[in-house]
Image (tube, rainbow, N blue to C red):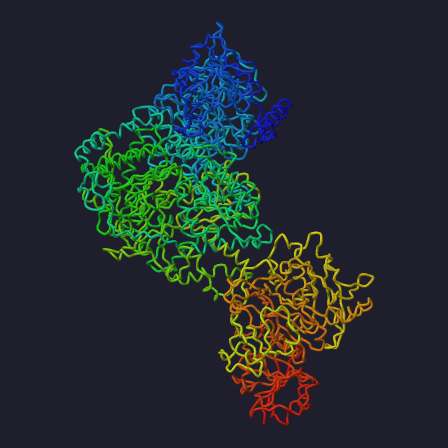
Amino acid sequence: MGNSYAGQLKSARFEEALHNSIEASLRSSSGDPQPIFTQLYLEPDPYPGNMEADIKLKADTALHSEGHELLNGHSSNDLEELEEDDDSDSSSPPLPYLQTPVPDGCCTLDGFCQAGKDLRLVTIAAEPIEVPPGFELVGAKSPSIPEHILVCAVDRRFLPDENGKNALLGFSGNCVGCGEKGFRYFTEFSNHINLKLSTQPKKQKHLKYYLVKNSQGALCKGPLICWKDSKTRQFSSGASTSKPSSSSSLSSKENGGTSGHSSSPFSLSDSPPTRMAQASSVFFGSQDLGRDCSFLKPLASTPGNKTLPIVPTALRVNGPANGLGVDVHPSLLSPSQVSLVPQTQGYRTPDLGDSPVSSAMNSGPPKKRHRSWHPSTLVPVPPTAVPVPAIRPIVGSPGSVLAVSSPQPLGVGVIQPQPVAAGETVIIPENLLSSSGVRPVILIGHGTLPYFYGNVANIVVSPLLVGCYKSSQLTEENLETLGLHSSQMLSVEMMILLTLQYLARLASNQIPLREELEQIVLKAMLCCPGNPAISPSQLPWLARLEASVSGGSVQVVVTHNSLGEGISESLRSLGEGPQHQRCLPTYVVVICASKMNGNEFCVLVLGKYQARALAEGMLTTNEFLKEISYELITGKVSVLASHFKSTSLGDNLDKQLVRYQRRRKGQVILPFQGDVTDNIHSQEPASMSPPPETAELLNRMFQIYPAQLTVARSLLSQVCSIADSGTQNLDLGRFCKVDFLVLVPPSHILVHQTAQRIRQSGVLVDLGNEDAYTAHQKSEKYVVRLDADVHTKMEAFMKKVKQNPYTLFVLIHDNSHVDLTSALSGSVCHGELQGLADRVVNCQEVLDAMNLLVLQVSCFPYTLQTHQSRISIHNEIHWPSSDSLQRELPSNELVYFGLRNYSCSLQWGVASPILRCDDAFEKMVHTLLERHPHLHSMVIRSYLLIQQYTEAMMALTSSPSLRDHITPETLAMVEDLINAPSREGSQGRGHMLLVRVPSLQLAMLARERLEDVRDKLGLQLCFAVLLGSPASELNLSRNFINILRAWKGCENEEWVPHTYEDLEGLPCIVILTGKEPLGETFPRSLKYTDLRLIDSSYLTRTALEQEVGLACTYVSMDVVQESKTSTAPRESDGEKTTVSLNDGDELERPQSNGSAATRTSGSLVENGVSSSDLADSFQKPSTSTSQPEGLVTSDMATITEGFKQECDSLGSQLSSNPLKAPNDPPSHYSSSSSSSPSPSSSSTQRPSQSTQCGRASKSSRVSPRTVILSRPAYNLLSGESGSQLSSFSLLPHADVSWSSPLRPLITHNLQGAEQSLYYRQWTVARQHHADYEAPPGPHPRRLLLSGPPQVGKTGAYLQFLRILFRMLIRLLEVDVYDDEDDEEEENTDGMTDVMTPANVQWPDIEDIRKMPFDPNPRDSKFRKASPVYSDKMPKFFKEFKKEGENQTQDTRMTKSIRLSRFAAHNAFHHCEQCHQYCEAVPTTQLSECSLHAFTFCSSMLGEEVQLQFFIPKAKEQHFVFSHQGSHLESLRLPLVSTKDPELLKSPIFTPTTGRQEHGLLNLFHAMEGAAHLHILVVKQFEMPHYRKYWPNHILLVLPAMFNNAGVGAARFMIKELSYHNLELERNRLEEQGVKRQDVWPFIVMMDDSCVLWNSYQSADASETSDGGLALANVSLKTVLQHMENTPKISLYAMCGVRKWSSTLARKAPRNAFSRCHLHDFVLLNVDLTQNVQYDLNRYACEEVDFNLRVNSSGLLMCCFNNFSLMKKHIPVGGNKDFVVKPKLVEIENKAPISSSQYVCAPDSEQTLLDAPAQFLLERFLQSCSHRLFPKAVQNKNNPVLSIDSYLNLSPEISVCYINSRPHSTNLNHQGLVFSGLLLYLCDSFVVSGLLKRFRFLKGATLCVICQDRSSLRQTIARLELEDEWQFRLRDEFQTANCSEDRPLYFLTGRHV
């Protein structure tokens, strides 16, 4: 803190602070007392050292002095009233305090207790009163009898000591009247003594004085009770407040003291607790109290001086802890801001504390509201701070100063009072404001301001532009960003000239803006690198030259001693002479060219409009609302109110209305039809309802539009990327449910609106949280208002979050830019609690919950995008721009019409623009503002607005003569409001007119007044007048409710409108009040938005844009396009009528050009923009849903398709088949989720346009709403006033500040992410902002959705919830193959007599032997494979696509199945049970795995093979190692005879490739957690990936030579290894006396996509149609153990299960067992199949090939049909196709390579390919065999003979498999004639004699395939093929490999 003297740690102080801290923590209800070291180090010593004692002493003497009450001309109770006002922590009128009713029979007289005893000091002063020990007598004040003091006895411990500290919280007191003791609550006590409070009773507010005995022994009023630290707390502006940056206001007792209230009336609860002085001089402890003048002087801040600026009233503290940084308050204010509090005109001797500077801000550390915080804290100015006016004691200065009674010895470091030179003093004239009508604003420039003395209340000091002059404080980094160099800094002289130039060019209705001047300064720095030096003599001349262009509005005053001289001179000239003779300059630039200090300057703003706007702009919204509230309560507005009691024609308004009312004799104007002249009696219409045929109009429909869908998907993908980021911040795999809570700002209507959206969207049903019935009842439970009750609701929610760890909760903070105040500064502010959002959303519980996402939704996210933002920029989702969306839409669609469109609409050139400024109104306001300088401009605007609407109603009914006195805008709106319902085709529907009145009191006044006038004019049936307040529900009279019910076709008598949208079509005026709009949606029938009250107090981007956001909505695209093309000339300014000021100074209304014109002015139809031809646009039903309301999608079918696939393909891990969509019930996009309508019915339905009567062509058009603005707002939004900036250049929000004095210009093209980056770089959160003390990094589970107002964000986030849930379910679901199996039904009849009943558990070996083997592979994965010939072949080939050129695999049918608890999982699955199974425990890192080589000799390969095992430590027990422990000897095998119900005997081998993440390798749940041995067989190059993902699995690594091999190689190696291991184990166990036959010979070979196993189990007859069996999920353990327990298991070669499909699942299998092909999941006997090998070269069909060989070897294969296996569709990895590409990249051809190019003639020039030879061969045969075997195509009776191998020759060619081994079982081929012969790598068992047994068709073809050309020739010779087959030289081919890739060769020939 720079030169702070505050840090000395004194032991006494330490003890005191420690005591305070402990006591506060014991008593504090909030649980956050201030840390002790903060108290010790951040609070300076009371200043000076003995100040507290002095003050107490002086206070006593002053209070006992006799004429005390005469010190000021008011009674002393002013003080208390003010104090009461101040402490209430809320605006006036105070919130009503609900008193408990007084018990019957009790006395309720003021001044007496409930027992009837007198307590008034005057009556009991002399009576003896018993005071118990430890008690004190104190005086209480009752608001009902302010002249009396009531005597009470209070326990001393609950009262403060003389330092204002150490009072225990709570209360203990006795009644001195009746003697009742032991009141423990002050509330109870205040009731007993009949205080009759309207606010919450507080002892600090109502216990005022100690009572002492005087010399006569009578009780009398003693010293004030010092509740607030060392000073008696006086009335203040800004008491106990919360925002560190705050102030109190200007304007107060100017009306000659009409009230005793303080200068600044309201307690601003957004400033830190302001410190009150007992008198202005108390700050320095060395001054007398009675002084009646105070003195303000800025202290030059030089390093090392210990001056303490006591910053008067409006100083805002925004900077860092020093509080006086360089920062500004909402676009205008800088930390060193001073607004001097106004005085009464008759300046009076102040009562204690009633000083003009009645408060000083403490610019200290962050303000928690702790009683222990030193109010006397005065922080020293850091050397860099702006000089700020500070009170400085003066001795002997001129003026009536009472002598100082015995000067006190000064404490160390105290400023010595010094005599002041006259030149530095500015005396402010006594009646400056009243004489000149202006309160000058001094804009701090450069240099030291003078002392101010006298009536300091009448000037305001503003730091608005001071930031522009601080370019010297730019950091190097910022300079670099701006493209500047430190040499380019501007001199003070240049700054002065730029400021002058800027002020000179401002228009008369503009005020200076910091952002504009900053841009000018920046441009100057960029374009003049070498600053021209300006000499002292040149400066005044140049300055005057600059000012001369302004036409007198800017003047330059040059002085040579001090700035004070120039300011004095300007103020003196201001106070002189009669008003009308002077033409004042708007700005006076005072330049002091002193030789000592260089040039200094400041700007005096004297223009009435500008000074007022700047002063009002310094207040926060809360502050100016309090100011208005104060003005209304104290009656300051009475002058204005009386002015408006008469009409513009001078008649008494009320009398005229009463006269008209009498004339009507109870008749009212008829609604719905006819003119204003049709009357009926007021009793009749109660039963009236509108025309009936419109009843079906308002059927509601919820639809999701493309933009909302896009946004929902973006949100979802962002959530997925958080989950995928690898940071463990979100684990989506563990959630199976979604729940949510929506937090909304405190608005009842918003709660209903959001709940209605939730109801209509059906999201609760889709999430499974409610059923269709309860969803309707309980939707409000999911929406919570941020009000006092939020804590209990949030506690319940957080409890749910903790109790449901597997539910993903989403906390949606809607309109999250509203009230982002820090909870630390939170207090009641203007009746609203602040800081609640921070408490809820940023509380530790919410931040820490791993199953909670926070989604902040905002139309104005700027306050969330500061440098300290809690949201990562990557987690921001921005609404897609309307341009990108509009391109896709046809012209009759609705498109969003937002802020940008409003600004652009000014270029449309239409005669009646939709964004307007009511200039006539502005001129009237201007006149009134000059006449009432003491009132806030919004009060004046409001009164004028009410009068305008009142007179417009009168002009249209009773007094046509008033027409010319109403602005055309107002008249047009009111006329449209009254007449629209009776127009043709409107069917009684009318428009809504929205009038925005931020102040609740003014809004209530407006509603009351307008309603009263409406009723007196007989218009009560024509339109409703509603108060739209966030704090209350809509209140509508019964007859209007009946009309709405009739339109809705609503039967329910109880129905009342809850949202504004419910008012669709109702003619009404809605007066919308509240600090800011909170996001409520308005109906389509809203036509006019009146924002004429929104003026220069709204100078931040958010404040201004959210007001205009009220009008944003969806409009017809053709309206927008028409308007853009229309080029009607703009109405010229000359035609606009003006306001003149006559001699009588009477306010005239603008003349309109004849009332006929005004009558139609509201319905100018020519441009189709703001015309009222849209009376019928309301015939489209309001889809009162997420606001793209009637936006109909052009092709809903495609969108619904998209919906159905929503989440079906999420990234690589979750993709799915698009064809599955039709099976999905489309419930998640339909209008009601309980039913599932067909896409055609629900989604293509357009909003009903059934009643397009009259102008059908236009009936569906929706036009933009007309917005009427005040001039300041219009200038900013239009950006058309030349130099004026647009609203997007303003400070984004009042709670943030610019981080640098200069920054690049923001343009309107900067949107979304770029805009966010800009604000994150250039803005910082203020001290009271919730993000001010945010943790350094953003929160990982927090997202921000931003989109323009009313664009449909609610619908988007509800859709997001839906697809999030859908995705979580998809994570819990899998797509399993669901193929129609070729059931061998038709064949079974003739096949066998052996039938095994479906409920038999195990196969009988004899039965199985008798069954025939079905050689045809029936699984659909072989549907593109050649059928195998058998006796019972189907008669016809299935339909087949000719020519296998379509390389892309046909997609197989899949079905989504919910995972059961027995599923196998991939690497993304995490749960508490299995995390040890698959995740490496930190202690067992990868190094814990041991690598073992295992070598054996393979007879098949004819060489030694070395395999590598990675064995985790935990799995070593499964292996046998040598005694040294290093050499791996074998894998342990159990015994056949072992009977252990828990044991799984077979080791499981899973060959896997490319699926380290997606392979289903986690079998923990499938095995029910049982111990098992699972070995992953991987290729060498993939080993590191699998080790990373599956560190606890045993890996078997294939030799490098198999890196390119197919799955056949893996299966071959598994089987070879297993047989070798079986032999090793037999040898090992034989030594232990075990029979060789008893060693378990089986292994399981299982694919990595097996996900679920099912079993048919006996069920009740009721459950299934056939009463037999039901399909249920079972575990893999169950299936394996069942198969392993099969009797005589060792006699089976292979066992397996069948594949699941939905058709098979519907009926139980006819046979429990069958002999057929087994694949995917096989229990393999490696002993019996020792001599049958998998073909290690194969890429496909290796299982069919192996099965045919096993069967023909006479071995048994058994399929357990009661079990079925589900295989997951995994789109990645596996044995997918190689990408076949040319070997040499240079000759790469972009054309795809067809499979016919996979072979070529030997030694040809053809492109050689980079793929294994075997792969090319298999692919060639699969697609081109019809060329090799033309006779076999589609010929089932003449198959191709294939010896010893099965190769896929395409589905059109059937193959007959023959095994050449002796003793093999083959098909009987007698009489069979073959169409071809295939010899594939045949061995020595194939001999010529064998081939001579077979008969071939004439012209049959032969194909012989060999490893190389020589073996090809040898084979042909050995088999004597040339005897029967004819060969040609050109029939020899090779696969298209180069020679080092060892191509395969084949020869074709014809049978002769």
Horizontal arrangement in the rendering, residue 1239 relative to residue 1302 (left or right): left
Horizontal arrangement in the rendering, residue 860 relative to residue 1574 (left or right): left
Residue 432 occupies quadrant: top left
Horizontal arrangement in the rendering, residue 1245 relative to residue 45 (left or right): left
Using the image as rendered, state which of residue 7 and residue 1412 is in the foreground: 1412
In the picture as drawn, the residue positioned furthest to the top comes out as 216
Q: Position of residue 1749 (x, y in %)?
A: 65, 79
**Residue 47 to residue 837: above or below:** above
Q: Position of residue 180 (x, y in %)?
A: 49, 16
Q: Is any part of residue 478 visible from this angle?
A: no
Quadrant showing the N terminus: top right
Q: Is any part of residue 173 visible from this angle?
A: yes
Using the image as rendered, state which of residue 463 and residue 483 is in the foreground: 463
Using the image as rendered, state which of residue 284 and residue 258 is in the foreground: 258
Quadrant showing the C terminus: bottom right
Q: Position of residue 1064 (x, y in %)?
A: 31, 47
Q: Position of residue 100 (x, y in %)?
A: 43, 26
**Residue 638 to residue 1560: above or below:** above
Number of callouts? 0
The residue sitting at 17% across, 35% down in the picture is: 664
**Residue 1430 to residue 105: above or below:** below
Residue 1416 occupies quadrant: bottom right
**Residue 170 to residue 1592: above or below:** above
